[in-house]
Image (spheres, helix red, strand yellow):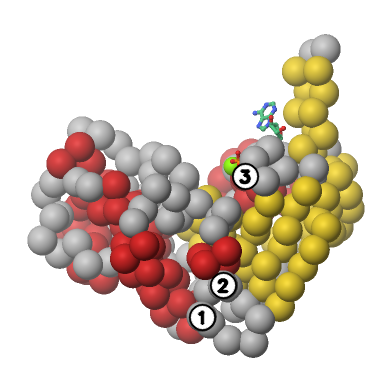
């Protein structure tokens, strides 16, 4: 839940107000799409939701915790426990295999073998059972995207945040990824994704439209596309 949240990027001479008095609520189990033109503040909003960035005024409560009162370490702990983040550019480690990339953020490390088994089952779940030992360079864009999603899911986060999860993917691969998101949402995960495609936003139950750092429209849908 966000209340009157403002984010200013201060670059000395130039101050960019990326978010202006944003108030909105994401309930547990929601599936929200954030839309808006380039520079409207979508990634900024997602980064703040994901506790990857701080804000300047207003408040943000994540599961009852006032985020702005927490120190960096505490924030990192909340983030690791509660949130899975799918980055627009995947952020995979190039020298590690798909399996190693997915196992990387595992929180409560057990034996290496058990960690790798968990990562393997997550990769099978996103349809990459036959690509475990490939490195990012040896995978297609859609496959990298699915590795990034598997990595975001490895700690079974309650909240999944995805920045353009289908950016640069063909429509078949996009539909596969959206089917996975719908399945996760039906299993009780909260999803917030940024997209510029209306067909992708149609999978969400709610669309929030940003313009110049402000919410200017919000739509609800009854069912998944
Ligand atoms: P896109 O669709 O192009 O990804 P966006 O909606 O995600 O756009 P943001 O990345 O949130 O937009 O940026 C919002 C505004 O904040 C832009 O005007 C941008 O130039 C500015 N901005 C974003 N990140 C920074 C930063 N790290 N430092 C300074 N200004 C920034
Ligand atoms: Mg962006």
Residue at image position (20%, 33%) is 95
Graded by Cα atoms within 10 Å as few (under 14), some (14 to 19) or many (20 or more), the crowding at tag 2 reads: some
Give the number of the mark in front: 3 or 1. 1
Q: Residue 41's x, y, as percent?
A: 71, 43
Residue 134 visible in this rendered orientation of the protein: yes
Q: Residue 64's x, y, as percent?
A: 74, 66
Residue at image position (53%, 74%) is 203
Residue 85 visible in this rendered orientation of the protein: no
Disc 2 or 1, which lies upstream in sequence?
2
| Quarter of the rendered structure image containing ligand 2 | top right
> Within the image, what quadrant is residue 116 found in?
bottom left
Figure check: 187 above or below 56: below
Q: Are marks 3 and 1 in contact (CB under 8 Å)?
A: no
Disc 3 or 1, which lies upstream in sequence?
3
Q: Is the residue marked 3 within 8 Å of ligand 2, measured from its CB?
A: yes
Graded by Cα atoms within 10 Å as few (under 14), some (14 to 19) or many (20 or more), the crowding at tag 3 reads: many
- Name the residue beneath numbered marker 1: 225
Name the residue nearer the viewer: 60 or 141: 141
Q: Secondary structure at mark 3?
A: helix
Q: Answer with left or right where residue 63 lies relative to residue 171.
A: right
- Name the residue beneath numbered marker 2: 202
Q: Answer with left or right where residue 128 lies relative to residue 146.
A: left
Q: Residue furthest bottom?
A: 222
Q: Is the residue marked 1 within 8 Å of ligand 1, measured from its CB?
A: no
CA–CA distance in space, label 3 to label 2: 19 Å
Q: Residue 175's x, y, as percent?
A: 38, 69
Q: Answer with left or right where residue 215 lies relative to residue 62.
A: right
Residue at image position (51%, 55%) is 162
Figure check: 138 above or below 203: above
CA–CA distance in space, label 3 to label 1: 24 Å
Disc 3 or 2, which lies upstream in sequence?
3
């Amino acid at each position: 839940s966000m209340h009157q949240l403002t984010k200013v990027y201060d670059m000395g001479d130039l101050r960019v107000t990326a978010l202006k008095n944003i108030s909105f609520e994401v309930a547990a189990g929601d599936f929200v799409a954030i839309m808006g033109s380039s520079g409207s503040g979508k990634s900024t909003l997602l980064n703040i939701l994901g506790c990857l960035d701080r804000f300047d005024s207003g408040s943000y409560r994540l599961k009852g915790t006032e985020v702005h009162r927490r120190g960096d370490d505490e924030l990192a702990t909340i983030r690791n426990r509660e949130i899975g983040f799918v980055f627009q550019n995947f952020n995979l480690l190039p020298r590690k295999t798909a399996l190693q990339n997915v196992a990387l953020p595992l929180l409560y490390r057990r034996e290496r073998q058990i960690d790798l088994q968990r990562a393997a089952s997550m990769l099978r779940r996103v349809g990459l059972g036959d690509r475990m030992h490939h490195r990012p360079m040896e995978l297609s864009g859609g496959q990298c995207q699915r590795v990034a999603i598997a990595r975001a899911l490895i700690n079974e986060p309650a909240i999944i945040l995805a920045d353009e999860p289908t950016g640069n993917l063909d429509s078949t691969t996009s539909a596969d990824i959206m089917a996975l998101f719908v399945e996760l949402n039906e299993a009780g995960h909260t999803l917030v994704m940024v997209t510029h495609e209306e067909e992708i936003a149609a999978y969400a139950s709610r669309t929030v439209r940003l313009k110049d750092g402000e919410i200017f429209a919000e739509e609800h849908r009854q069912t998944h596309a």
